[in-house]
Image (cartoon, rainbow, N blue to C red):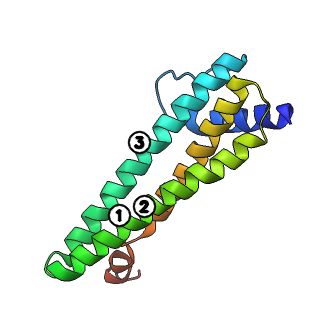
Amino acid sequence: MKSLLWLLAFISVGAYAADDDGPTPCDNVETAQQSLDCSAYNRKTAESELEDAYNGLTARISAQYGDQPKLLKDYLAKIGAAQDIWRTLRTADCAVEVMEADKDANAAQTAENDCMAQRSDERSEYLQGIGTQADETDTPDN
């Protein structure tokens, strides 16, 4: 199990380290503490990107439905409720994954950070796809 956690940590290191131009805690990870620091960095980055994706979604929806205040209010309320429920599910799912981690506190925290980062990335991609269908149908094919 320990080798699986290290493998997941190193996979996530490559994914996030490649996205940033400057040095990160994910450069040259060799120790458990460095792995923990990297996982915390990845989690923070993924959660920031998630926030950007959520804000982008609300901006797209507001632009598309700004002339229909009731529908806009309902749409934004549903998006907010779904996001709250998703956050609860992400926390619960990651708690289950951490139960499978080693009892070492650093390994467990690294596993939780990696899970939260991965789930946040998946959610960001999903949110970025909502509200873009109108943009795709408005553009003529070449």
User: How busy is the neighbourhood of tag 3: few (under 14 within 10 Å), some, or many (20 plus)?
Assistant: some
Helix, strand or loop for disc 1: helix
Amino acid type, mark 1: Gly
Q: Is residue 39 left or right of residue 69?
A: right
* Residue 116 in the image: above or below residue 138: above
Image marks 2 and 1: residues in contact by CB distance under 8 Å = yes
Q: Which is nearer the eye, 106 or 123?
A: 106
* Residue 137 in the image: above or below residue 120: below
Q: Which residue is mark 2?
A: 83
Which residue is drawn at the image coordinates 16% and 75% (left, top)? 66
Q: Nearer the viewer, mark 3 or mark 2?
A: 2
Helix, strand or loop for disc 2: helix
* Residue 57 shows in the view: yes
User: How busy is the neighbourhood of tag 1: few (under 14 within 10 Å), some, or many (20 plus)?
Assistant: some
* Residue 8 in the image: above or below residue 135: above
Percent position (x, y) of residue 7? 78, 35
Percent position (x, y) of residue 65? 21, 77
Q: Which residue is mark 1?
A: 80
Which residue is drawn at the image coordinates 51% and 55% (left, top)? 88
* Residue 139 in the image: above or below residue 99: below
Q: Which mark is residue 48?
A: 3
